[in-house]
């Protein structure tokens, strides 16, 4: 109860200050609090309001996170189609942020939902996306076996630039998101 009061008091301050990112984050925290207390319907309301604020302000990363939380609350209410739509939209929102947004977790959540609702083909496709995203992350984080330590103080600005070097692979490969 004390946490809820503190969040609501802080939210009132953010509203007075017109701090929309702060409002969205506090609404998300209230949603998390209510969901942890088993009050999924109330959590949905907080998450929806947070999603609306982030969508309106163009905060796609925040919107994606809040849509994932909203999907979790909807799942707790057996609102599977709504949860699926929120997860698909979350994936779209976080896609531009690559590995930082840990897309494999959202794809894995979607896989679980599809499996639980009797959609094995969709579950398989979501699992493949999750695996590909995670493997891409691991590949991109691994140091090259051929890397050597460059002890030179700084690059020579007069040195030729290798513009025709191959571009690194896109972090999500050629995946198509639903």
Image (cartoon, rainbow, N blue to C red):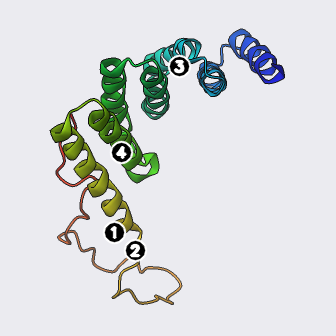
Question: N-terminal of the two: label 2 or label 4?
Answer: 4
Q: Depth-wise, is mark 2 or mark 4 nearer the camera? A: 4
First reached walking from the N terminus: tag 4 or tag 1: 4
Q: Earlier in the sequence, mark 2 or mark 3?
A: 3
Mark 4 element type: helix
Q: Residues within 10 Å of mark 3 (few under 14, many from 20)?
A: many
- Give how far across and how far down residue 27 sits, in percent: 62, 19
* Mark 2 and mark 4: Cα distance apart in space: 23 Å
Secondary structure found at label 3: helix
On the image, numbered disc 2 is attached to which residue? 142
Say if mark 1 contacts mark 2, CB within 8 Å: yes
- The label nearer to you, 3 versus 4, is 4
Q: Earlier in the sequence, mark 1 or mark 3?
A: 3
Say what secondary structure mark 2 lies in: loop
How far is disc 1 from disc 2 in space, using C-alphas? 5 Å
The first of marks 3 and 4 along the sequence is: 3
**Can residue 171 be seen?**
no
Residue that label 3 marks: 47
- State if disc 4 and disc 3 touch (CB < 8 Å): no
From the image, which quarter does the C terminus lie in? top left
The residues bearing labels 4 and 1 have C-alpha atoms spaced at a distance of: 19 Å
Is residue 93 visible in the rendered structure shown here?
Answer: yes
Dot 2 crowding, Cα within 10 Å, few <14, some 14–19, many 20+? few
Q: State how many labels appear.
A: 4
Disc 3 to disc 4, C-alpha distance: 21 Å
Q: Which residue is mark 1?
A: 139
For this view, does 65 lie left or right of residue 25?
Answer: left
Specify whether 171 is left or right of 119. Answer: right
Give above or below for 164 relative to 17: below
Which residue occupies the foreground of this view, 34 or 50? 34
């Amino acid at each position: 109860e004390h946490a809820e009061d503190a969040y609501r008091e802080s939210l009132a301050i953010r509203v007075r200050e017109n701090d929309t990112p702060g409002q969205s984050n506090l609404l998300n925290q209230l949603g998390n609090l209510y969901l942890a207390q088993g009050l999924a319907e109330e959590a949905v309301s907080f998450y929806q309001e947070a999603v609306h604020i982030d969508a309106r302000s163009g905060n796609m990363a925040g919107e994606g996170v809040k849509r994932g939380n909203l999907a979790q609350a909807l799942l707790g209410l057996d609102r599977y189609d709504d949860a699926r739509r929120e997860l698909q939209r979350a994936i779209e929102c976080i896609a531009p942020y690559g590995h930082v947004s840990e897309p494999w977790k959202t794809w894995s959540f979607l896989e679980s939902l599809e499996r639980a609702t009797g959609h094995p083909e969709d579950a398989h496709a979501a699992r493949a996306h999750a695996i590909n995203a995670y493997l891409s992350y691991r590949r991109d984080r691994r140091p090259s076996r051929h890397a050597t330590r460059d002890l030179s103080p700084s690059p020579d600005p007069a040195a030729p630039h290798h513009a025709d070097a191959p571009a690194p692979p896109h972090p999500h490969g050629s995946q198509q998101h639903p």
